[in-house]
Amino acid sequence: MGRAETLMDMYDAMLGALGPSHWWPGETPLEIAVGAVLTQNTNWKNVSQAIDNLKRAGLLDVKGLLALPVPELEEFIRPAGYFRLKAGRLRNLLAFIDREVDGDIGLLGDRDFSGLREALLGVKGIGPETADAILCYALDYPVFVVDAYTARMFQRHGLVPNEADYHELQAFVMDVLPRDVALFNEYHALIVRVGKDWCKKQKGLCETCPLQPFLS
DNA sequence: CACCAGGCAAGTA
DNA sequence: TACTTGCATGGT
């Protein structure tokens, strides 16, 4: 059985067990991009509170957020943790959006993929996962987002070497599956959902995991 | 109590 | 280049 078939069988198993994910949680490209920064190494539940704070204050707006004094921004996003760090990272991203497309993040979707990805990676605080999450979930580029769960899952199933880096994990999927934004969107979402419920860092409840049949 | 959560950058040797 | 550490809150 080839890699593409295996990956699609795993996808079907997860989708069949859990149903569609409807990711990313977030109503606008900007909300998704902000969430992508805030969720770095952080539980989504905490991020959700931070985003609610910004929403209720009517601040989910590039220029509005940039005009906000940093200490106030920090208070709004405090529940998401690393709030000083993330206030800076958010401002770096917002300044980028303001500079490139005058604050209209949707316009980034017209850009050449590779150039835009490189530009995002040039923003301090935006690494490969955050860049790809923004590209896939906010801007609809067909890119597969890799995260800690992805590495853990593929490693535990013996599909990739334990030392595989971000790009290798991403290529493992993208080299063999059709470049379909809906597919990559759902695939990453399913991996996170399965990871959260069955594949914690230390404990794994493999007996009831939808991917249990795929364990060698 | 320990450990984890949808990372990333800076520091050290 | 290859590790290590700081960043911070909230939940299990």
Image (cartoon, coloured by chain):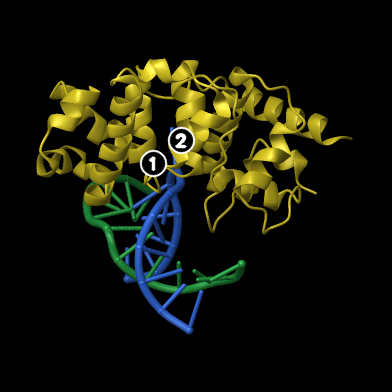
Chain colours: A yellow, B blue, C green
Query: In what quadrant of the picture does the N terminus of chain A appear?
Result: top right
Residue A213 in the image: x percent, y percent? 76, 39
User: From the viewer's perspective, is residue A27 above or below residue A47?
Assistant: above
Q: Name the one closer to the observer, A79 or A75.
A: A75
Q: Residue at x 37, y 26 (%)?
A: A32
Amino acid residing under circle 1: Val
Residue A100 in the image: x percent, y percent? 35, 25
Residue most extreme to the right: A1
Residue A215 in the image: x percent, y percent? 75, 46
User: Chain ID for label 2?
Assistant: A
Amino acid residing under circle 2: Ala
User: Chain ID for label 1?
Assistant: A
Cβ–Cβ below 8 Å for labels 1 and 2? yes
Q: Name the one closer to the observer, A50 or A142.
A: A142
Q: Is residue A207 in view from this perspective?
A: no
Q: Which mark is residue A123?
A: 1
